[in-house]
Amino acid sequence: MIRSGFRTALLVAAAGIALAIAVACGQSTNLSTTPPAETEAIAQGQERDPQTLRLLYSPAVVTLNPHLATGYQDFEAARIVYEPLASYNQAGELVPFLADEIPSAENGGVAADGTSVTWTLRPDVTWTDGKPFTADDVVFTFELIHNPAVAAATAQYYEGVKSVEAIDNYTVKITFNHPTAAWSVPFTGQTGLILPRHIFEQANGPDARAVPANLQPMGTGPYKALGFESGTVLYEPNSSYWGGRPAFERVELLGGLAPYAAAREVLQTNEADFAQNLQVEAEALSELETNATGHVTNLFGPQVERIMLNFANPFARTEDGERSSPKIPHPYFSDLRVRQAINLAIDRDTIAKTLYASAGEPTAQLLVAPSDYQSKSVTYTYDLAQAKALLDQAGWVDTNGDGLRDKGGVTLQVLFQAAVNPVRQKTQAIVSDSLKKLGIDVEISRVRLDEFFSGDPKDTRSLNHFYADMQIYSTGNESPDPSTYMGWWTCANIASQANQWQEPNNARYCNPAYDRLWEEATQELDPDRRIELFRQMNELLAKDVAVIPVVHRAMTNAVSNRLANVEFTPWDASTWTIKDWHPAADAAGS
């Protein structure tokens, strides 16, 4: 059963607006106007409302401002309210949202020299407060993202943009710093959601995270947020939505559930309609699918479960107190032979087969989608004997007979961190077992989900602070164009104290040869040449063991059988077409 506090909130629908006002004023609010005992009794006996859509997530939502997102759950929640100019469907085709049409060379939208793109906007869109959506809102969104004082989580997707100009109320011109094949990256997908200038203009600065509108947004999407409390978001239809009234009268989004519990609510107890990103062991998920009230979808896209090795010393501090700084190289991961040994000790086949089954494929490729970018020369081997030989060559041997390798009085030991999750903890165990056979001492660290994936500079246990030797998580390119994603390994994108740990290169890897390849790829307009350049980047990262890809992961969701017209894409949030979701014909009125 979904926890009682959430059920109470749903029973008292009228309290949603009161909650929104209270949250906006920074007050602590109890949603219930019914005595607790009575409310719980009602909750246990209440039938599910067929006009209510219930969505479940493992991490709790922190903000509804996508450009300040702390993790994918924030994008998922914001995508219900906000929209981009366009997005990519599962086939990789651009689909318009706030744009009136997709720019092309043929219609004059994409400049022949690749230095600009011009979008025309829908003229019939309003924000939920009735104000018109115009090109000036697109301009403002760029101003906020581009403002370093904001430290926007999406800034990396706009780094090549020189200017955004409103030609008129419904025409926007984006000019790039140099010829850019990736003209479709800015303002598309979940990283391209448009904010209203008239709501956020006063929040364009260092206090951006403190404004009430982050929790009570005014969007253009199919639903509007009624209230927000402890990761729970309530929505109702946007009566002025340009795409027509959506099918459900209420949407309830709940975060903070364990993946197995979320899957069970959809597949067995019929308490929810959708559970996202289910990292549940294959065997356990298969059992839940028996005689289920829903089904599991596996969509392979760009997601790769990877192990990161820290090129900086996570335990030493610079003079100004910074840890994991490239100024102090890692004592043993700076040696390529040690990194190669770790790579050889990763049993990808066992991890993929036992923990993922049909939802994962072993891989050494970092860039897996679109598949054209994969390099045939990047392969993997599980070979502990070869790994031991490399460590011997590097001078790491067991000098005192304690079973652990050492060198110069230093024991070869690693702190291996991951977010709390059963699949990742079992992956840690499999990897740890192999490393111990090599004579490496392994300490396992399990970090709370909201801390590990946090974008808050104060969360020192986050993956970008990376105060450990090794860490594992999953991510991939947000767009079919991998320019931004492959830019994560450039020297300029190293996460540091100076950039509030907002840059994505948390491994602190730096290779000028890689940077040159990336610079060339971002400016190359010939598609075949670009593919070749990205393959070379993939190969160089593999050669340097800059990252250790482990499993090509499918996005695994659970969907109730009572839902119809649910379409997913690997290039946007799962909620990207929530405007089209509706009850299945055979489930209507049930």
Image (cartoon, helix red, strand yellow):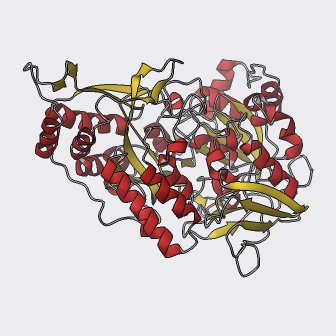
92 above or below 55? below
Q: Which quadrant holds residue 206?
A: top right
78 above or below 405? below
Q: Residue at coordinates 60% horizontally, 71% vertically from top-left?
A: 93
Residue 55 is left or right of residue 266, and the answer is right
Q: Residue at coordinates 84% horizontally, 65% vertically from top-left?
A: 122
Q: Which quadrant holds residue 478?
A: bottom right
Q: Nearer the viewer, residue 113 or 237?
A: 113
Residue 256 is left or right of residue 163, and the answer is left
| Residue 331 in picture, x, y percent from top left | 31, 28
- Does residue 277 show up? no
Q: Residue at coordinates 82% horizontally, 62% vertically from top-left?
A: 172
Q: Quadrant of the C terminus?
A: bottom right
Residue 582 is left or right of residue 170, and the answer is left
Q: Which quadrant holds residue 407?
A: top left
In the picture as drawn, the residue positioned furthest to the bottom comes out as: 106
| Residue 367 in picture, x, y percent from top left | 43, 58
| Residue 542 in picture, x, y percent from top left | 33, 53
Q: Nearer the viewer, residue 464 or 273?
A: 464
Residue 505 is left or right of residue 540, and the answer is right
| Residue 242 in picture, x, y percent from top left | 83, 61
Q: Nearer the viewer, residue 171 or 577?
A: 171
